[in-house]
Image (cartoon, rainbow, N blue to C red):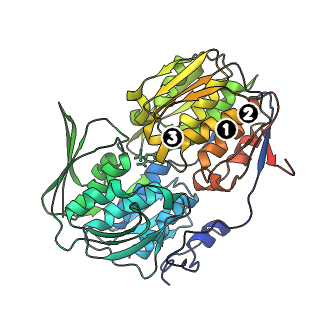
Amino acid sequence: MPCGGGLVKTKGDRKIAAVLGGAKPPEPEKVTPLSGDLQPLISRKTQGLKGRIRVPGDKSMSHRALMLGAISIGETRIRGLLESDDVLATARAMDALGAKVTTGADGAWHVRGVGVAGLTSPEAPLDFGNAGTGVRLCLGLMASTPLTARCIGDASLSRRPMGRVIEPLEKIGARFEASEGNRLPLTIHGAKDAVPITYTLPVPSAQVKSAVLLAGLNTPGHTTVIEPVPTRDHTERMLKAFGARISSEDRADGRHISVEGQHELKGQELTIPGDPSSAAFPLVAALITPGSALTIENVMLNPTRLGLVETLLEMGANIEIQDRRVSGGEEVGDLAVKTSRLKAVRVPAHRAPSMIDEFPILAVAAAFAEGSTRMEGLAELRVKESDRLAAIQAGLTANGVLSQAGPDWLEVMGGGAPGGGKVTTHLDHRIAMSFLVMGLGARIYTTVDDGRMIATSFPDFTGLMNGLGARIAPAEGK
Ligand code: S3P
């Protein structure tokens, strides 16, 4: 079976079975179609979100755990893996490249790896769905091994730039046949004799950094990435845990991260903590909904991911970090949050990489703050699952919130959201969740045109929010 061979489904989870279980390989030249019709959702004004919750496992770590497991010797056991569409696409890709990915009766995911040089050509195209992290990191993983793979994705992913990884990976020796503008669908031919490079990141992107470092694992000598602006460092931390020869040093021109290739990695036991980017939604929901008090347990507190919490604290948010501890090589803690009067702040450009996925929900918080919040350094938002800067502004406008934007900045006038608007989500999960959160605090409801993409990162978002007291439901006729 090209896409699902070796996968054992013992959990009885129909979703996992459907995604991993030998689904028909998609047509090579098409974008992945979304199943079913649009699912409009409505979110109504709510009082008092209360409870203790856990959000699903971190998406960045989940992708990386599957990929490093796939090229290790022995078995990697992963607890707390995010079982979302994006991550399941990566699981299926690892399986198709020769690793064995299974779910166990113990609730963990098991990956039997093939070694750093062991990946083989998949029989069918690898379908990454909506996942930029999945495809860009996997291109790196494949780039230094002589295999050929066709990569496809949905309409959103097929619009996103792949040139940013193609450029360094070509220098290592991989060859690409990409669609116009260096986009998907594309075919990669991994290098037979990969050469090590030193590469300075032209954009602050953890995906590009990670793609180059992963390519370095099967390349002789030292592959080095110079990172002028720090970005999330999960690849570096996890590589260390798997026994890779990786070092980093801060110099005048940035952090130099170097991996020595062609040394085997060893399978690990990993526990993935809660995703701070998912925790952001109930966190802001509690801040803007009167009478709320909730605790979000077991949230990853890696400093390269904490820009939103830092910003909300500056805005006057009542957030307490409790029970800080270390789990799975990452600091974690519980976030206790209460309804707060927020005031506007200026978010400096240098903070953007540590909260790059959180600007849509920060814009919602800013709409409820007193004064005008300015966010800078947002150029990368233009190339996310949607043009997020444009999508945020359109969503604010639709709901009666005034804003201004430039090429890489956004200013949101606070004072509360009238609501009543329908938001176009453009296949972007974070736009959908952010404007559903807005509805909980708006004068009247908000609606979003399609909630299907929420499953890419936070499958039970609606159930979890409604369990706290939110009122999010299918929008009949709105
Ligand atoms: C990610 C890096 C970020 C982020 C994405 C996850 C990662 O993208 O937006 O959701 O796991 O490396 P960029 O590296 O393109 O900024």
Q: Residue furthest left?
A: 221
Q: Please tell me the numbered disc located at residue 395.
A: 1
Q: Is residue 304 visible?
A: yes
Residue at x-position 58% and y-position 38%: 279
Q: Residue furthest right?
A: 477
Q: Earlier in the sequence, mark 2 or mark 3?
A: 3
Q: Say which quarter of the image contains residue 122.
A: bottom left
Left or right, 124 with respect to 170, comes to right
Residue at x-position 58% and y-position 76%: 21
Q: Please tell me the numbered disc located at residue 450.
A: none
Q: Please tell me the numbered disc located at residue 399.
A: 2
Mark 1–mark 2 contact, CB under 8 Å? yes
Callout 2 amino acid: Asn
x, y (%) of residue 207?
A: 37, 50
Left or right, 210 with respect to 443, comes to left
Mark 3–mark 1 contact, CB under 8 Å? no
Q: Mark 3 falls on what kind of element?
A: loop
x, y (%) of residue 428?
A: 60, 50
The one of 353 and 408 positioned closer to us in this rendering: 408
How far apart, in angstroms, are the residues tagged by discs 3 and 1? 16 Å
Q: Say which quarter of the image contains residue 38.
A: bottom right
With respect to residue 287, does 117 lie above or below? below
